Image: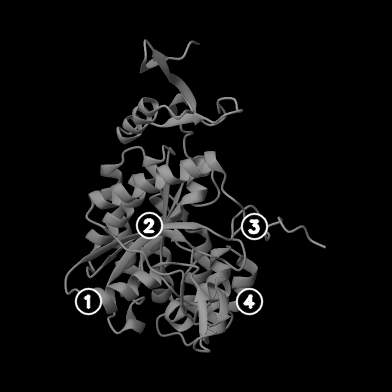
Amino acid sequence: MLSAWLLPEHIADVLPGPARRVESLRRALLDRAGSYGFELVMPPLLEHLESLLTGTGRELDLRTFKLVDQASGRLLGLRADTTPQAARIDAHLLNHDGVTRLAYCGPTLHTRPAGLAATREPLQFGAEIFGHAGLEADLEAAELALDCITAAAVGPLTIDYADARVLRGVLAGVVLDEARLHDIARALASKDASTLAALTDGVPAESRAALRALPRLFGGDEVLVAARELLPARALVREALEQLQWLASHLRAAYPTLGLGFDLSDMGGYAYYSGARFALFGPGGSDALARGGRYDEVGAVFGRNRPAVGFSLDLKALAERAAPLPAPRAIRAPWGEDAELRAAVRRLREAGETVLAVLPGHQPEAETFVCDRELVQVAGRWVLQAVAA
């Protein structure tokens, strides 16, 4: 029999120290998004399943917990990603004609972890720009993502770019069933050359050669040069390469220490993204700290197929990589019924100070806080004094 206090696999409590780091980051990132003009929204954790999943692809479906609504009998989903909800809010509730910038931060739930050490309950922070199809929005999303990771004092940073249009351009005019296309995208993402070779048998020669070249197209600026030589000179491919180069040049100018690379075979989220997409990595990290890009089709199910670009990250995972916070300073005070003591404690708390009342029969709490001052009674008055080292 399982112990009642055991949590499900890949689900964990967040204890006081780590929780303080997460909350500090949450406030910093929301403030940073606010400085760009993003407005906070708080979508519900639970929605009708079709609202959460339509247009998002098979991967999100597999990650979404599903249950039956006892009130209506309809299928509900516990969100695994907040982006479709932001699209619903933009399209159905706000209904603006111009640009809308939305930010959010809240829990999500996954049926399976993304990795061996990953949580199934990420705290997702994200920002979305709706209504602008130009590269200016793509650049703003990447810059905000970089600023958010920088706010966590994680660095140096590397950004890797890919683009869903490369595969669409390479396969332009080629008829493939959905399952085979999905398998090709997965083989490209994992750089599985043997599987890719088998899957591309029968594909027209020009597209077949390009598909088999894609797994080699990763690295620095030389990738874009090689791609122009090895990939078909089709409109979507040309547009993708030109726009990737534009984004890279602007990011290098704004962030001189930023590492920047390209991986044209990375087709993760191929069914979801419609243009350039990026992943941000910290030093020595194999797991991305943030992911984002353009996904213009996400609002179609809600009746307004607006241009959309944004990013998201797991605040818990970022907090684990962030620079440690210093222990918070506090004032130690005795517990007592003396009216002047209680008034002094209230005044200090109202002024923003942390005051720890030492409850009767207990020693001062020293694990989390650094009590560098204390309230003591001197000549009948309660005054602050430095705690002796």
Specify which label sits upstream in the sequence, 1 or 3.
3
Task: Describe residue 114's horizontal placement relative to residue 309 as left or right.
Answer: right
Task: State the SS at label 3.
Answer: loop
* Crowding at mark 4 (Cα within 10 Å: few <14, some 14-19, many 20+): few
Q: Is label 1 or label 4 in front? A: 1
For the residues bearing labels 1 and 4, Cβ distance under 8 angstroms:
no
Q: Is label 3 or label 4 in front? A: 3
Q: Position of residue 53 (x, y in %)?
A: 46, 78
Which residue is at 47% across, 69% downward?
269
Q: Position of residue 114 (x, y in %)?
A: 59, 60
Q: Residue 198, which numbered label?
A: 4
Task: Describe residue 143's horizontal placement relative to residue 69 as left or right.
Answer: left
Specify which label sits upstream in the sequence, 2 or 1.
1
Q: State the separation of the CA atoms marked 2 and 4.
A: 26 Å
Q: Position of residue 72 (x, y in %)?
A: 49, 89
Q: Is residue 331 above or below residue 307?
A: above
Specify which label sits upstream in the sequence, 2 or 4.
4
Q: Is residue 163 above or below residue 47?
A: above
Disc 2 marks a residue whose amino acid type is Leu
Q: Is residue 138 above or below residue 13?
A: below
Task: Describe residue 38's horizontal placement relative to residue 157 as left or right.
Answer: left
Specify which label sits upstream in the sequence, 3 or 4.
3
Q: Residue 95, which numbered label?
A: 1
Task: State the SS at label 4.
Answer: helix
Nearest the eye: 41 or 324: 41
Disc 1 marks a residue whose amino acid type is Asn
Task: State the SS at label 1.
Answer: loop
Q: State the separation of the CA atoms marked 1 and 4.
A: 47 Å
For the residues bearing labels 2 and 3, Cβ distance under 8 angstroms:
no
Q: State the separation of the CA atoms marked 1 and 3.
A: 38 Å
Task: State the SS at label 2.
Answer: helix
Q: Quadrant of the N terminus?
A: bottom right
